[in-house]
Image (cartoon, rainbow, N blue to C red):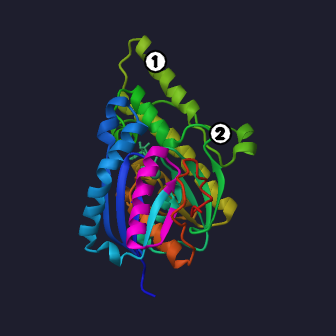
Amino acid sequence: MSEPLILGIESSCDETGVGIVRGYELLANEVASSVELHVRFGGVVPEVASRAHLQAIVPTLRRALEKADVSLGEVDAIAVTAGPGLMGALVVGLSAAKALASVANKPLYGLNHLVGHVAVDMLEHGSLPQSCAALLVSGGHSSLLAVNDVTCDISELGATIDDAAGEAYDKVARLLGLPYPGGPVIDKAAQGGNPRAIAFPRGLTAQKDLAKHRFNYSFSGLKTAVSRWVETARLAGDEIEVNDVAASFQEAVCDVLTAKAIDACRYLATDQILLGGGVAANTRLRALLDERAAAAGITVRRPRPGLCTDNGAMIAVLGAEVVKAGLAPSGLEIGANPGLPVTQVVVR
Ligand code: KG4
Ligand code: ZN
C-alpha cells in the first residue's frame, strides 16, 4: 500500500493549522496565528481565539491544498485535534473537519493534540523506536511519557502538579514586562544573561519530594520566587537585570525538566528520548537535554523548532500513523474534549 495522504487540522489554542502529509513526507503546513490579538491581554482569550479560527480556517485550508498541490478528493483521511484545548477553539476545527469528511466522503480521525506533539518528530526522523521516553512540554502541559506505540500505547509517568512549563515562561515574562508569548522572548533575553546570577528553586527535586513526585514537575513555586525577587529588587530601588533574571529562571526550568527526563529513561531502561511541545523550541532546553543525554548514552529525538509549536502537520502525521496501523476512524458523531488525557490517542 502506498503511504496515506492525510489532511490534518489543528485549532486547540491560538493557531489555526492545516497540514498535509503523505506518510512521513510533509507536503504543506500552513499556520494562521491569532497571537497578535492576545498580546494586549497577556494571554490567550478563548472567545477571541475561537472567532479568529472561524475566520482563518477556510483560507488556511485553501492555502494548504494549493501548496501541497492536492485536491480534497485525493486525500485518504481527515485528521483533526479533538482535545485537549479550549472548547470553543476545538469546535471550530472539528466542525470544519466533519464538514470536509462528510462532503468528500472521507474517514474522520479525532486525535489527541499532545500525542501530535510527540508524533511530529516522525516528519524529520521517520518511525519511532519500539519504545521510548518522551518529554512533552507545552503551554498547558508538562509530562514525562512512556511511548510504546504512538497510535495506541502511551502511559504517563508524571506531569506537572501546578503550572505547565510554557505557562511559567508566559507568567514570568509578564512580570518582567515582556510580551506574550513569553517563551521565545525569555529564550532570547536569557542568551544575554547569566544563568547563575540568581539561585532560583528547583521544584520537586528535594529528597523528601522525590518519593512521591519522582516524575512530577512543579513550576508555580519558581514563578513565585521570581516574582518575589523582582518585587524585592524594585522596592530596594535596584535596577533589574532582565537578562539575568530570564537566564536564571530558564536554567531552573531546564535543569529540572532534563534531570527528570534522564531519570525517566533510566527507569524505563530506554536509550531514546523524544522532546515535543512548544517549549521544545527552547534553545537552552535543547542544548541541556543533548548534553545530559549524551553523558548518559541516550539519543535525543526532537523536531526542528518550527514544528514544535502548534501546527496541522503534527496532527496529519499522527493521522497517517493511525491509518497505517489500521485503526478504525472516529466517526462523525465525536465531540471535542478539552480535558482529553494523553493516553487516549484516537477519540471515539
Ligand atoms: O505547544 P504549544 O505551541 O501550545 C500548546 O499546546 O500549549 O506551546 C506554547 C507554549 C507557550 O507557553 C510558549 O511561551 C512556549 O510554548 N514556547 C517557548 C518557546 N517557544 C514557545 N517556551 C520556551 N522557549 C521557546 N523558545
Ligand atoms: Zn500544543
Which corner quadrant of the image does residue 120 belong to? bottom left
Against 224, residue 272 (above or below) is below
Q: Nearer the viewer, residue 132 or 25?
A: 25
Q: Is residue 74 left or right of residue 154?
A: left
Tell whether 58 sits left or right of 301: left
Q: Quadrant of the C terminus?
A: bottom right
Magenta region: 82-110
Q: Which mark is residue 204?
A: 2
| Residue that extends furthest to the top in the rendered view of this protein | 236
SS at mark 1 in the image: helix
Dot 2 or dot 1: first in sequence order is 2
Q: Check disc 1 and report the residue beneath it.
A: 231
For label 2, the crowd category at 10 Å Cα-Cα, with few meaning under 14, some 14 to 19 and many 20 or more, is many
Left or right of 340 in this view: 308: left
Q: Is residue 86 visible?
A: no
Image position of 226 with respect to 233: above or below: below
